Image (cartoon, rainbow, N blue to C red):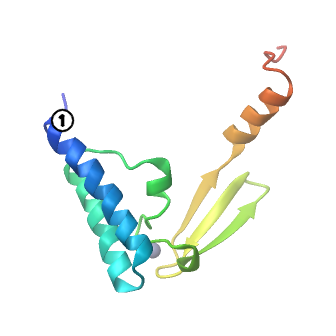
């Protein structure tokens, strides 16, 4: 079984991750990257998951803060994904939207189950 940090500590780390990413948004350049990498480090140390939106703000390779200016965002229709490329290291992340698209279709079709 995985060892976990006390709940109180994980709560504090979640709060601090949120604050660090807020700081990163306000700052720019090396300080923003520093805040982002600290947030990532904290998430790893305290076994807390970054929320989806938080995860997308940090480059998985170089841990830079991916502000709208620090990444290139394109859509790939063939792969049904948004491809975000970090301008600092060139690493690209695919963010698939197939599930969202299917959910939207289900919603349009009135939540009917597909006939098999
Ligand atoms: Zn990067």
Give the quadrant of residue 21. Answer: bottom left
> Residue 42 lies in what quarter of the image?
bottom left
Judge left or right: residue 21 versus residue 109.
left
Instruction: Name the spot of residue 100 as percent of width and height, x first.
Output: 69, 40
Beta carbon at label 1 within 8 Å of ligand 1: no
Taking the image as drawn, is residue 63 in sight? no
Work out which residue is located at the far bottom of the displayed protein and give it. Answer: 29
Report the front residue among 20 and 58: 20
- Which residue was labeled with disc 1? 7
Residue 30 in percent (x, y) is at 35, 85
Give 90 or 36, whichever is nearer the viewer.
36
Residue in the image at 60% along x and 54% along y: 95
Q: Residue at x 42, y 75 (%)?
A: 26
Vertical placement of residue 10 versus 115, above or below: below
Q: Residue at x 64, y 63 (%)?
A: 83
Q: Where is residue 23 in the image (x, y as percent from the top left)?
A: 35, 70
Q: What element carries label 1?
A: helix
> Ligand 1 falls in which quarter?
bottom left
The residue drawn where x is 49% and y is 71% is: 66
């Amino acid at each position: 079984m995985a060892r976990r940090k006390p709940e109180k500590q994980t709560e504090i780390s979640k709060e601090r991750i949120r604050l660090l990413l807020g700081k990163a948004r306000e700052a720019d350049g090396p300080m923003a990257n520093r805040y982002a990498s600290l947030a990532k480090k904290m998430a790893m140390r305290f076994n807390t998951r970054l929320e989806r939106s938080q995860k997308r703000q940090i480059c998985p390779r170089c841990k830079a803060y991916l502000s709208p200016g620090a990444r290139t965002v394109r859509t790939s229709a063939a792969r049904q994904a948004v491809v975000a490329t970090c301008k600092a290291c060139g690493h690209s992340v695919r963010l698939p939207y197939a599930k969202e698209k299917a959910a939207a279709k289900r919603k349009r079709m009135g939540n009917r189950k597909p006939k098999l």
